[in-house]
Amino acid sequence: MSYKHQPQNESAGLPVKDPEELEGYLDAFLDISVDPVFIRDGEGKLLVANNAFCELVNVSREKLIGTTFSDKIYPQEFVKLAQSDKQVLDTGEDKVVEQTLKGKDNKAIVVVAKISRFIDRNNRRFIVGVIRDVTKRRQNELRETTRSEVLELITNGEPLKVVLNAIVSVVELNNPEMMCSILLLDESGIHLRSGTGASLPKFYVDAIDGVEIGSGVGSCGTAAFINERVIVADIQTHPYWKNFKALAERANLGACWSEPIRSTQGAVLGTFAIYHASINYPCDADLALIEQTASLASIAIEKNRSEETLKRAASVFTHANEGIIITDASATIIEVNDTLCRITGYSKSEVLGKNPKILQSGRHAAQFYENMWNTLNTDGNWRGEIWNRRKDGEIYPEMVTISAVKNEEGQVQHYVSLSTDISEIKLNEGKLERIAHYDLLTNLPNRVLLAKRLNQAIKHSQLQQNSLAVAFMDLDGFKAINDNYGHNIGDQFLVEVSSGLKASLRAGDTIARIGGDEFIIIMVNLNEFSDCEHVLNRLLKSASAPVNVADAVMQVSASIGVTVFPQDNVDADQLIRHADQAMYVAKQGGKNRYHQFDLEQDNAINTYNKSIDNVRVALERNEFVLHYQPKVNMSSGEVIGVEALIRWEHPESGLIPPLDFLPVIEGHGVSLQVGEWVIDAALTQIACWQKSGISLPVSVNISAHQLQQDNFTSRLETLLAAHPDVDPGYLELEILETSALQDTFQVSSTMNACHDLGVSFALDDFGTGYSSLTYLKRLPAYLIKIDQSFVRDMLDDTDDLAIVEGVVGLAKTFKREVIAEGVESVEHGVSLVRLGCELAQGYGIAKPMPAIKISQWLTTWEANEAWLALSGNRELA
């Protein structure tokens, strides 16, 4: 076979070569490659296959060329192959696919193929592929998967039938050409009874159920009789199958390999068999699979038959990922596995004969262990978290399951403990809880922790019959610092100011950062208002003190609103709202001062109502517009969508950013009208783009208040129905202010109902304190957005870098996609891709822009070469 190549003409700058000579060069180049290489035409026919490819499938080149290669591809794989080829031929984008092929002797081989499109001078399209054999890796994964699943089922006390079905199912799932069965030797030791074999014809399973073992009784009857492995590659010619050939032919069985299932003492418990539809010889990997699977089946069968074999079966767990302790009835350790020794640092000789108490850390009270033993004695098992101590003194958390093994009389014979070191999980939980409760820039409490402390303070005030004050502080002039010096300097300034503010408080008081330059202070144990006035004056003085940052002296002032409980006898949220209204009055009154909230006379109420009316009028006059910021995959350069951002085109004030009007209306009915307007405008734009040939998913921000409306799903369905030409899958909803979600169960139900409509969700600004492990666990959002405040400084601030890395890791742990906002430079993108975060948006990619500019931007957008270079052939590496 020659690899056809059209030589370049002399005008291309290269001398004309003899075509046969060039073909020879190409032949040599392809055949020297250790990786299989092939070329297919648009109809799936092989045009080129190098030596490595022919060796992989054990077919000569002459027989391969011009065929669709269908006899070497499993039917269920053929459709997937055709779809992948079509996608690459249509889009020109490279694709990496995994396939199961038939190799030598029709053995299943698992390969990863990178396929690309090639277009020749005649505009004909071809598929060029490079293959890597990953069969051994998949077989190793299978062994680990089977072993872990079976051990878990055995430990959880699942019925024997369930365990055996699991053993067979995993093998067949990963080896589609195999059909498996497990036969159990009955108590007489004479007959084999069906354990499992669902993939075999029922008439065949019924026919061999109860067969008497003996030499020449098929593969399984003989293997059980002689206690040795029996390999029959051709059933129709093998003497062992003389009396069963017709049955096998009817069942379309061509080969049967059988392995005795032995007890730890070597006695036959049954057989594990692998069948093939045609003549088949096992390879070394097949033999290893047979042996390991039979070994796992023996564990399940022995545990089911006798508790006395539990101690012997424990030796099989030596290399388990879980630490295992087996004790006698008096809780004296009689066996441990190597993993337990590795986790604790103790050798076997140091723990055998001891009580598990040697691992106690001292963190748990005696009542904890008393409750544990009460549950164990009552239910026969206990599961929970325990903090134990390693030999070197380090205290670590474990997830522990303890089971009592009883004899026929119900007396405890042994206790079996399985433990997993969950230090890494706890570390991730701690990071997330830190994110959930503290502002990562200033290290002050955030809204979540503030809410907890304020509610506690209110209860304490009621109990002690004294007062508390809630102050809302906003820095005057901070925006100018950000505008003049940049966000990095602004953040450093905030850190310095926050430190001074915190030092101005009394012991027991709390200051929390709830926004860019907004703080809330809780002052407790007040007998009269003058008690808090001293603190307020110190806060004003501290806020207005000059701060030296980056060799520049900067200075701001503060406006503070304050309200006192129980004089202002409302709940925690209302206290904050009243303090906020009072702050607005202080700011209007000249700044650098505080103002006490007056429920009856405060002018902030009127100002608030006026702001609500202004937004309502703007909505009626259609003064709102949407700008769109692109979101991209940095590794592939793909534009994955845009985020819709609302702007107010005020007839007098010009373009007003959302933070200047959305916070004012939050929680008010008009905010729901604005939210629905945004969704409707986004759907309208999607339809408009699609008519011009642009298909872009659009994400829209929704508030917690809007999402928690009882009619949210029905309103969304109505909006979607008004745009029948728009696929709901192109709309994504980004949840803001997750800390305001009151009923996660109700919100989760709402989200699932929206999923049924085709709409997906994302958690916005993740990591700013508005998120928690609970939301990540309970809310069905497929995407997490890393807040720009961390991304922006990650190149200079190791804490921010660690936070970004932690959120990416948590996203992978919870199987969520993750996107970073605030990518302002090439270096930001490089660092994120290296951390495993490929999706991004930010000024380094594109600023928000009117919809009319998106199409032009799409034609000029190119991902940075440094980002693309990092992706490389990662999936083949």
Image (cartoon, grey):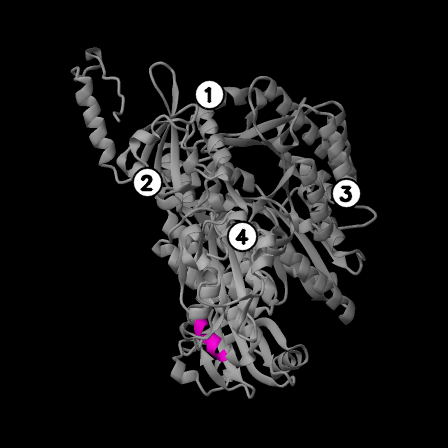
Q: Are marks 2 and 3 in contact (CB under 8 Å)?
A: no
- Magenta segment, which residues? 311-317
Is residue 11 visible in this depiction of the protein?
A: yes
Q: Determine which residue is flagged by label 3.
A: 709
All told, the count of numbered labels is: 4
Is residue 608 visible in this depiction of the protein?
A: no
For the stretch drawn in magenta, the main secondary structure is helix
- Residue at image location 49% in from the left, 23% down from the top: 858
- Residue at image location 64% in from the left, 55% down from the top: 448
Q: Determine which residue is flagged by label 2.
A: 58
Is residue 750 shown above or below 45? below
Q: Are marks 3 and 4 in contact (CB under 8 Å)?
A: no
Q: Earlier in the sequence, mark 4 or mark 1?
A: 4
Mark 1 packing: few (<14 Cα in 10 Å), some, or many (20+)?
A: few
Q: Position of residue 124 (x, y in %)?
A: 38, 18
Q: Position of residue 529 (x, y in %)?
A: 73, 61
Marks 3 and 4, how far apart at CA? 65 Å
Q: Earlier in the sequence, mark 2 or mark 1?
A: 2
Q: Amino acid at mark 3?
A: Gln
Per the image, label 1 sits on a secondary structure element best described as helix
Q: Position of residue 315 (x, y in %)?
A: 44, 75
Q: Nearer the viewer, residue 666 or 767?
A: 767
Q: Nearer the viewer, residue 753 or 746?
A: 753
Q: Determine which residue is flagged by label 4.
A: 247
Q: Earlier in the sequence, mark 2 or mark 3?
A: 2
Q: Position of residue 180 (x, y in %)?
A: 51, 55
Camera-near label (2 vs 3) is 2
Camera-near label (2 vs 1) is 2
Q: Determine which residue is flagged by label 1.
A: 859
